[in-house]
Amino acid sequence: MVPLDMNVRDDQRPSVRWRAWAGYADPLRGVAMASMPMPAFAQDNVLATATLPRDLSPWGMFVNADSVVKAVLIGLAFASLVTWTVWLAKSIEIVICKRRMRAALSILASVRSASEGVERLADTKGEVRQFLDAAVTELKLSAGSIERDGIKERIASRLERIEAAYGRRLLRGTGVLATIGSTAPFVGLFGTVWGIMNSFIGISKSHTTNLAVVAPGIAEALLATAFGLAAAIPAVVIYNVFARSISGYRALLGDASAEVLRLVSRDLERPATSSARKASPLPIVAR
């Protein structure tokens, strides 16, 4: 009930205030007010929401992404492809090298001299054959020398250089894995920052904080982060696996080098032993 002014006469009591309250109570007038056109900014928000991309699949996000985010995603995909290519090539190379080294070491363990080892490994090509060739070459160059320790040092120096060269050759390509593993997360982070920045720019242009406006940019940012991790994690794991495998290969090289040095030591001691026996006038009689 609406209070009336007591200072007016009874015929003046249906005042303007009463008519206003009666108008609000009229349901037809409420329907007419509801059918009035919306403000301009509300219509813009609806149109902006309707034109947003609704495909939030990985391919849809890539297609609708910014050019910078696309470049980041393509670069990370290429880095991942390089990682798996290096893994396949290096895995095959390491397996072949280790198998060749084990076969040559089994032959080298059964020979008695360096020249015999060269004859037994004449049909093979590899690290052990090169070790033997270097040892035999140094023995020929030092044929007139009487300093056996100097000959052994020169042969050891040759073998050490050959061993280092084969180790460096097998390490080729693994540096790419280290680079990808250390830089890919930061490249993905750059795409994340760029996507979030685009999201804030979309908020400022649309004058709304509707999730439908913000979601595409955030999804692109998260996709860049996912691509960075997908490229970096396998690269780091594969690099560690290769590091252990190459360490095992270098251990085999060290074993082969030590075996060749033992053969050279035997070859250097044989002439001295035979000459000592020839110089002895009396046979040695056991007592």
Image (cartoon, rainbow, N blue to C red):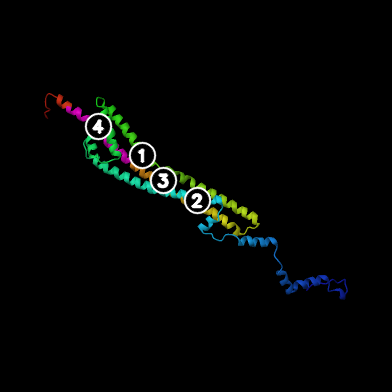
Stretch in magenta? 250-274
Q: Which mark is residue 265?
A: 4
Amino acid beneath label 3: Tyr
The foreground one among 157 and 284 is 157
Amino acid beneath label 1: Gly
Count numbered badges in the picture.
4
Residue 175: % across, % down: 43, 42
**What residue did someone put label 2 on?**
74
1 vs 2, front mark: 2
Describe residue 188's horizontal placement relative to residue 17 as left or right: left
Whichever of callouts 3 and 2 sits on the residue coming sooner in the sequence is 2
**What residue did someone put label 3 on?**
239
4 vs 1, front mark: 1
Q: Quadrant of residue 174?
A: top left
Work out whether 61 lies above or below 179.
below
Work out whether 286 lies above or below 214.
above
Amino acid beneath label 4: Ser
Q: Residues within 10 Å of mark 3 (few under 14, many from 20)?
A: many
Q: Main secondary structure of the magenta part?
A: helix
Residue 93: % across, % down: 35, 45
Residue 260: % across, % down: 27, 35
Work out whether 99 lies above or below 263.
below
Q: Residues within 10 Å of mark 1 (few under 14, many from 20)?
A: some
Whichever of callouts 1 and 3 sits on the residue coming sooner in the sequence is 1
